[in-house]
Image (tube, rainbow, N blue to C red):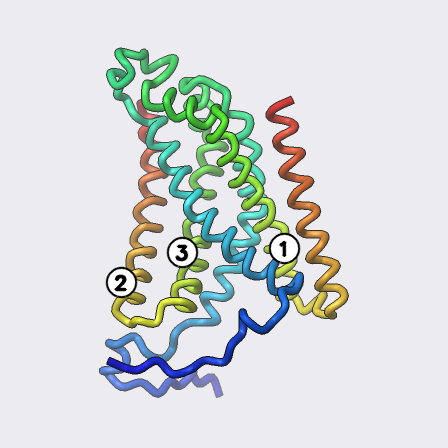
Amino acid sequence: MKRARPLSPHLQIYKPQITSVLSILHRVMGVVLSFGMVGVVLWLLLLSCHDTTCAGGVDWETSSGCYGCFQGFFGGFFGTLLLMGFSFAFFYHLSNGVRHLFWDAGRGYKLETAEKSGLFVVGISLVLTALLWASILL
Amino acid sequence: MGEHKTVQRTPLGRVKGLGQHSGAHHWWVQRLTAVALVPLGLWFIYTLAHLAPLPAADVRAFLTTPLHMTLMILFLITGFHHAQLGLQVVIEDYVHCEGLKFALLVGVKFLAVGLGLLGTVCLFAIAHG
């Protein structure tokens, strides 16, 4: 078995910066959204389910037992919290993704610009999430 | 001139998947899917928010109109492709055990294709039913 060679310390040394934190956050949100995609397929699967007997003979036309259950969970407190989390993940990954696309075009690399755009991304993500949920809940 | 790119590759290397790793291709497709997902993703979030409180029958009726069904399928395909490419990079970055890395990479790819197809089939099933 190969003995692990020593590595230079990094996380223990470097102070977290806007740049590095937003970068890892982008990756984390991406992974979170991947799970979200699985959830989307689950949603479609339940929608397509013809099984009307699981919640005691619920009519296919108006509602489906499994789908109703699913809807009920996400309408509840924890379900709503989960959806809010996913929507923030989406808006953050979208906004930071656009920031990445600007970098791909060669723009915005100056440190000051990168830090400003980073703060803007965080701000706009929070705003869009708030706006979405205001339109849903109010 | 017109010469094709020359790659140093032995038969064993090709089988092991070394060399010519289409890194640039991966990069491009990731950006293309990203750009496509800006409108598609926003459409999806907006649609989901609107559909959430509705009973199943109404949701089905909405989703199976030609335009919305097409957008939904596009969202699934593009989303899963983008996710697969992203997860591939994450796995390559953090998993160093070659066996596990290979298994995870293949697994993610299969899941992306399988789930994308499943979602699409569900939509057709709803439309048909």
In the foreground, B98 or A43: B98
Is A11 positioned to the left or the right of A104 in the image?
A: left
Residue B26 % position (x, y): 45, 65
Eye-nearest disc, 1 or 2: 2
Mark 1–mark 3 distance (CA, rounded to whole Å):
19 Å
Eye-nearest disc, 2 or 3: 2
Residue under circle 2? B103
Name the element at disc 2: helix
Up/down of A6 relative to A59, above or below: below
Is A81 positioned to the left or the right of A49 in the image?
A: right
Residue type beneath disc 1: Val
Name the element at disc 1: helix
Mark 1–mark 2 distance (CA, rounded to whole Å):
32 Å
Q: Which chain letter goes with mark 3?
A: B
Mark 2–mark 3 distance (CA, rounded to whole Å):
14 Å
The residue at 69%/40% (across/down) is: A127
Tag 2 and tag 3, C-beta contact below 8 Å? no
Q: How many marks?
A: 3
Residue A71 % position (x, y): 43, 24
For disc 2, the neighbor class at 10 Å (few under 14, some 14 to 19, many from 20) is few
Residue A65 % position (x, y): 32, 18
Residue under circle 1? A98
Residue type beneath disc 3: Gln
User: Residue B4, can we see it?
Assistant: no
Residue under circle 3? B84
Same-subunit check for callouts 1 and 3 = no
For disc 3, the neighbor class at 10 Å (few under 14, some 14 to 19, many from 20) is many
* 2 or 3: tag closer to the N-terminus: 3
The residue at 51%/77% (across/down) is: A9
In the foreground, A110 or B67: A110
